[in-house]
Image (tube, rainbow, N blue to C red):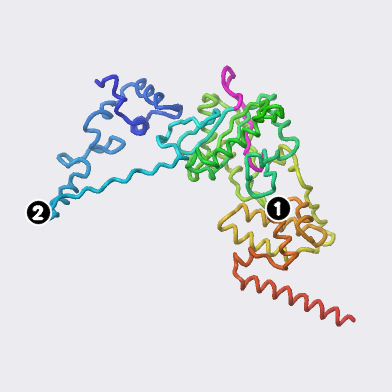
Amino acid sequence: MVDGDWADGVSTGKLKRFLVSNGVDVADCLERDDLVKKAKATPDLPLQQLVSPEASKKSKYFSTPAPEGAPEGDEGDKENAAAKRPAGEAKVKKAKRPKKVDEHEIPDAVEGSVHDLGRDWRFLCPGLIFKTYGVGGDEPPATKVAAFDLDGTLIRVKSGRPFSVSPDDWCPFNAKVFKTLEKFHKDGYRIVVFSNQAGVGKKVLGKASLNLRTKVDNVAYKRNPKDPLGGGELRFPFVFFCANRKDEVYRKPADGMFTYFRDTVNAGAALDLGASFYCGDMAGRPGDLDVTDKEFAERCGLPFRTPEEVFGPAGGKAAVPKRDKDGDQTNHNEELCEIFLKISAKLKEVDKFKARAFENAATTLKDYDKKVEGKKEAMKLRGIGKSIGEKVEEYCTTGKIKLMEELFGTVEATKEKAKKEAEEKEQGMAFAFMD
């Protein structure tokens, strides 16, 4: 028989491992109290293992007893160390260093615990940040879901850079996005956003986390110019999830975020997967960095769609028209395209997003029907932002790009210059012969 206050001396992590090792489902346990209630409500649990002194001699899953008579902890090591010390020499105790606590982390967070981040944002340790916007209360659980990725699907970077530089550096994917989402809501869909945000990492109270949460809040509400805080009307009810760590069960393409939504926020209610869908831009197409969104949809059992299929073409700059396959195929920016592609190939080793920017710029310039002459002209083309525009300006002004030299060394850059000079010389000789 175990006393009613048995849980006071048991840590949350130890209690959770004990329940899991005894086949108890703890998926719906968001707080420590939920674990305690689950333990008390489950019959025939050997709770004495949690409070018995014998538990400390067993493995963390309470299955393998320590050998009879064996010293507890590392007593055996202590005895051996004492035997090796010269007689009369006292043991010198090393001062313990205080554990460094990062102010941007939550010190008491343990796996499975849920913490308040402010403004209704919550953190499920170790890898899930989420918030519900206008969802809950007396509303019945959803039966069908319209799920989306965030960046590159619902919104894009307003500045044209690879990443947003502030919570306000975003704009809708195109002019139809919010009206389309409102219609999905009216048609009975639960709108859910699943996003990978590994840049946040462990620092869930840090700057990257705050910027992300502020940006999503800005997306959720219509701006009210009369409100000094910028608050306004909620556009439509939805739920936002982001995986803030790499290699966690919640990070796409793993289905952990979807499973958590279904089992907790949606109260475990059955979903009509055939009537639901997931939309994302990482679909394995030419120019896509990955295929994570498509794989995520497959693992969740959801039909997959691209942003263009749901909302239409991206807004902003007009795309350069594709050449007619039977027409003139001259690449008027061939050398610059080659440089951009080489830079892209090298950057893929360290920064896929920057690599993608150079690759997209090369594709755009290849189809451009004349030789680009500078930054302003280049930045009018889709896929070329300020950073790439500056590289175009540098090339047009100096005939080279410093980043190329930094990545490949001056030898490669010299080869490019020599190749260009040889081609110009050959062209000059051809014109001289014609004269």
State the residue position of label 1: 386
Q: Which amino acid does the dot numbered 2 rest on?
A: Ala
Q: Which quarter of the rendering shows the C terminus?
A: bottom right
Residue 92: percent from left, percent from top = 20, 50
Residue 226: percent from left, percent from top = 71, 27
Residue located at (57% from left, 28% from top): 132
SS under mark 1: helix
State the residue position of label 2: 87
Quarter occupied by residue 425: bottom right
SS under mark 2: loop
Q: Which quarter of the rendering shows the N terminus?
A: top left
Compare marks 1 and 2 and give the one earlier in the sequence.
Answer: 2
Q: Residue furthest left?
A: 87
Residue 252 in view? no
Residue 136, magenta (yes or no) = yes
Magenta part of the protein: which range? Answer: 133-153
